[in-house]
Image (cartoon, grey):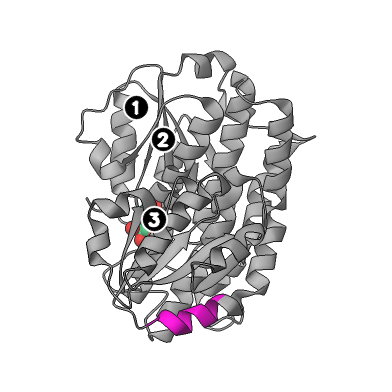
Amino acid sequence: SAAEKGGYEHFMIKEIMEQPEAIRKTISPRIRNGEVVLDDLKLSARDLEEMDRLYIIACGSSYHVGMAAKYVMEKLLRKPVEVTLASEFRYCEPIVTPNTLALVISQSGETIDTLAAMREARRLGARVISIVNVVGSTIARESDGVLYTWAGPEIAVATTKAYSTQLAVVYLIALYAARLLGTITAQEYDAILAELQRVPDKLEQILNHKEDIQYFATLYFNRHSMFFIGRNLDYAVGLEGSLKLKEISYIHSEAYAAGELKHGTISLIEPGTLVVALAGYTPLFEKTVSNAVEVKSRGADVLGLTTQAMATALKGTADHVIAIPETHPILLPSLEVVPMQLFAYYTALQRGCDIDKPRNLAKSVTVE
Ligand code: G6P
């Protein structure tokens, strides 16, 4: 009913709008006196120093959080991080030692592939920590340590607030572990933590202008094919943007690391193809823009996404630009993903799709 949806037309848009609050609820119990407190994980500096590898194991959008987490963790911890799809992990003879840490990410805590992969990691001797939304779920119960996301019940099949809160927890873990390892300066730690606490307000600014994204969706909703390109953290967000779009609008879409386009995919670009160019990550801005120029010259329409400071520069290449507030570069995925969710939502709305219950998909997949 409309009441359950808080007056919104769909659970998905209600849940998109709930993200600032969900992130606040998730991070605030974990920050005390300017410090991230995750002592219940019982991870010591020694454990982290001896850690030979961090495996991140998940499916679907939770896996995309893992893709962003790899960039974040490797940057801050200087330790090898491997992100694996749970359905692959089980059968790939993973290299696990008693010094291996596994981070399992799951909204439901019941995804069978993820659960089985987690059991395999434990059997091989890894210590397992998890990021889970459903309290008391199987994955939460079987982990050595669990960090809950406080997103509340997520009803729409396409995840939004679970993704955002999982990502917020990733930043908490990365900051906490980097401090223990001594791989982050006090200044950098304080800067990232302060900015993380500003993410909810900045998301509110983005959500206050959601009609801008709706307008872009009305321009492009009838395209047959869309591509999401970006590098580094922008690439990780592109993967999620593309998945959201295909899940609910049924438009064929793919995400590519922008530099990889020229090795094949660029052959698919033709007049009328929409390319969403994610160029928020300032260190690689020029590189991604040059890839956007390449697709533009082959007839694609380009919808750019970057920070306010870079918006004018991107307008030289892109047909339209979504500008997000400035933040610490490492936190960009938290802001960038929301316009991508909105774009998928409004595109599906325009196409008359069954947004909250897309065909063939289930909220939680408990079969292999
Ligand atoms: C299903 C859902 C996805 C979700 C994935 C993993 O495929 O439709 O939205 O990302 O499962 O779910 P989990 O509950 O483990 O995060």
**Residue 142: which numbered mark, if any?**
2
**Residue 209 image offset from top left, x and y in percent:** 65, 74
At label 3, counting other C-alpha atoms closer than 10 Å, the crowd grade (few under 14, some 14-19, many 20 or more) is many
As for residue 309 lying within the magenta part, the answer is no
Closer to the camera: disc 3 or disc 1?
3
Q: Quadrant of residue 355?
A: bottom left
Which badge, 3 or 1, is on the more N-terminal residue? 1
Q: For marks 3 and 2, give the CA distance.
A: 29 Å
In the displayed structure image, the side of residue 362 where residue 208 appears, left or right: right
Does the beta carbon at disc 2 come under 8 Å from ligand 1?
Answer: no
The residue carrying mark 1 is 122
**Residue 246 falls in which quadrant of the image?**
bottom left
What residue is drawn where x is 56% and y is 30%?
Answer: 76
Which element type, helix, strand or loop, lies under badge 3? helix
For badge 3, the amino acid type reads: Leu
Asked whether 218 falls inside the magenta stretch, the response is yes
- Horizontally, residue 260 falls left or right of residue 70, namely left
Highlighted magenta segment, given as a residue range? 213-221
User: Distance from label 3 to label 1 (Cα)?
Assistant: 29 Å
